[in-house]
Image: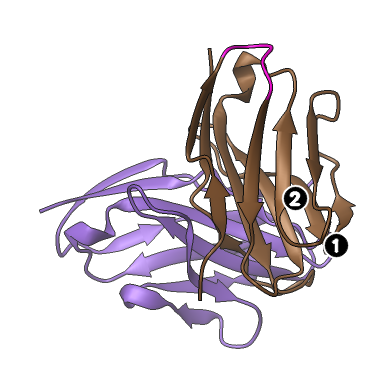
Chain colours: A brown, B purple
Amino acid sequence: EAGVAQSPRYKIIEKRQSVAFWCNPISGHATLYWYQQILGQGPKLLIQFQNNGVVDDSQLPKDRFSAERLKGVDSTLKIQPAKLEDSAVYLCASSLSFAFQETQYFGPGTRLLVL
Amino acid sequence: AQSVSQHNHHVILSEAASLELGCNYSYGGTVNLFWYVQYPGQHLQLLLKYFSGDPLVKGIKGFEAEFIKSKFSFNLRKPSVQWSDTAEYFCAVTTSGTYKYIFGTGTRLKVLA
């Protein structure tokens, strides 16, 4: 089966610019996650969707980050305006459902560099 | 707040050496435990997971992990590493309270041929 797709794979922008990342989860997976992975750290959950509804966005910096999953399938994460500290890998993951024991499947990530 | 600690940040081993990577978590309730691996240039992949039952879990590529509830630990082991095991390894936990994955900071393993 096809895995989680993400684009672009790399992005370089200047601070105060905006950027958007796209994710297409595994077909049939109801739950979609966006993570931020800063160099030297583990992935940190930014936002979690169940179908097209937000389950958890407690760690999303809502003054500059936004995300949507309009039709309950693919999703977009946006940063506007970007700061230097946003330089990181942004990972998308999906799982069959929102449940305690679900395994998450990760995409290749988008590496963002903010200059 | 729940947290996951991986004490070894960088490990260098020669081929055929035995491997043990530490993972400790802080949560007193029911947990699910995962080890993910990220090979160079590839995405995070599930190595093994523990939900319940036998605390010794076997995963892919000869890896295993043991859940010791009294020590809040889920250490990853492999009796004999290969050069192809060079990767970054992440421990993660979900709890009955939040269902969220909490990741450790990762351990970079380099295996010398």
Give the chain letter at badge 2: B
Residue A95 % position (x, y) = 68, 68
**Location of mark 1 (residue):** B97
- Asked whether the viewer can see residue A70, the reply is yes
> Going by the image, does A29 lie left or right of A114?
right
| Gap in angstroms between the C-alphas marked 2 and 1 | 10 Å
- Viewer-nearest residue: A13 or A32: A13
Q: Say which amino acid is labelled 1.
A: Gly
Q: In the rendering, at what x and y percent does residue A75 appear?
A: 72, 50
What residue lies at 32% left-to-right and 76% top-to-bottom?
A: B62
**SS state under label 1:** loop
Up-down relation of residue B60 to residue A73 (above or below): below
Q: At 58% from the left edge and 12% from the top edge, which residue is drawn?
A: A14
What is the x, y in percent for residue B42?
Answer: 39, 53
Is label 2 in contact with label 1 (beta carbons under 8 Å)? Answer: yes
Q: Are marks 2 and 1 on the same chain?
A: yes
From which residue to which does the magenta span run? A14-18
> Residue beneath label 2, please?
B2
Amino acid found under the numbered disc labelled 2:
Gln
Residue B92: within the magenta?
Answer: no
Q: Is residue A37 above or below residue A26?
A: above
Tag 1 subunit:
B
Q: Is residue A60 visible?
A: no
B94 relative to A23, above or below: below
Instruction: Say left or right for B74 vs A69.
Output: left
Rendering coords of residue A98 (x, y %) = 79, 69
Which residue appears at 74% of the width and 62% of the height?
A: A73
Q: Residue furthest left?
A: B113
